[in-house]
Amino acid sequence: MAIILNLETATTNCSVSIAENGKLIALKEYNSADYSHAEQLHLFIESALRDANLSLANIEAIAVSKGPGSYTGLRIGVSAAKGLCYALDIPLIAISTLKSMAYQAKGEPIDFIIPVLDARRMEVYSCVFDTHLNELRPTKAELIDAYSFEAYSSQGTVLLLGSGAEKCKEPLKSKPNIKYRTALIPSAKDMVSLSFKKFKENNFENVAYFEPYYLKDFMLQKKL
């Protein structure tokens, strides 16, 4: 039996799920542009445990969304996950934020799934998968222009999903086989199958040295 606590804080959605043997048994999340993670994450963990009629002592592993995404959100999620792993002496599992997003479109009648998270200006974080979630191109930060993802849109139907999809619409408006799902957000419920698979494979992180996958350096935004 494997009871895994999943934490997703890479974007505006503060999301916590608990799964048993790869099946969701509790979910608590709230999507706020104000990034409520610091105030809500531990409260959501407690709430999810109550809903599942479990205690922290029942948890056998912690899975955390590793990024890319919000610098502050990732720090909060990873710090909480590492603290719990140390305290409970249980393993840490890292899940790609973009892969868990792609999971929401797994098996759909399209050729390529491309999760895109909003970065700065016309930039996005993206990764390319087929409909079986095989990674075809690794994660990178890229500027969007009229030629973005052309290697895939020229071969078949592409689904762009996530917060970065909206800014892609205008530059890619001449590509009719690109579809968009702009409202999709990362959620701990979509980490369930991925974290259980890694648990069965004993695919764990070094708790002491694990760091979020920021992809780009943190830049402090100053008000004019």
Image (spheres, helix red, strand yellow):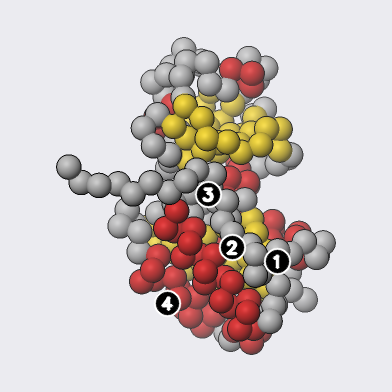
Q: Which residue is mark 4?
A: 43
* Mark sitting earlier along the chain (2/4): 4
**Which residue is labeled 3 in the image?**
214
Q: Earlier in the sequence, mark 4 or mark 1?
A: 4
| Mark positioned earlier in the residue sequence (3 or 2) | 2
* Mark 3 in CB contact with mark 2 (< 8 angstroms): no
Q: Nearer the viewer, mark 3 or mark 4?
A: 3
Distance from Cα at disc 4 to Cα at disc 1: 26 Å
Find numbered disc 3 in the image and state the secondary structure of the residue it sits on.
loop
How packed mark 3 is, by other alpha carbons closer than 10 Å (few <14, some 14-19, many 20 or more), is some
Determine which residue is flagged by label 1.
206
**Amino acid bearing label 2:** Val
Q: Is residue 219 left or right of residue 140?
A: left
- The residue pinned by badge 2 equals 64
Residue in front for this viewpoint, 15 or 65:
65
Q: CA distance from mark 2 to mark 4?
A: 16 Å
**Outermost right residue:** 201
Q: CA distance from mark 3 to mark 4?
A: 25 Å
Cα gap from disc 1 to disc 3, whole angstroms: 17 Å
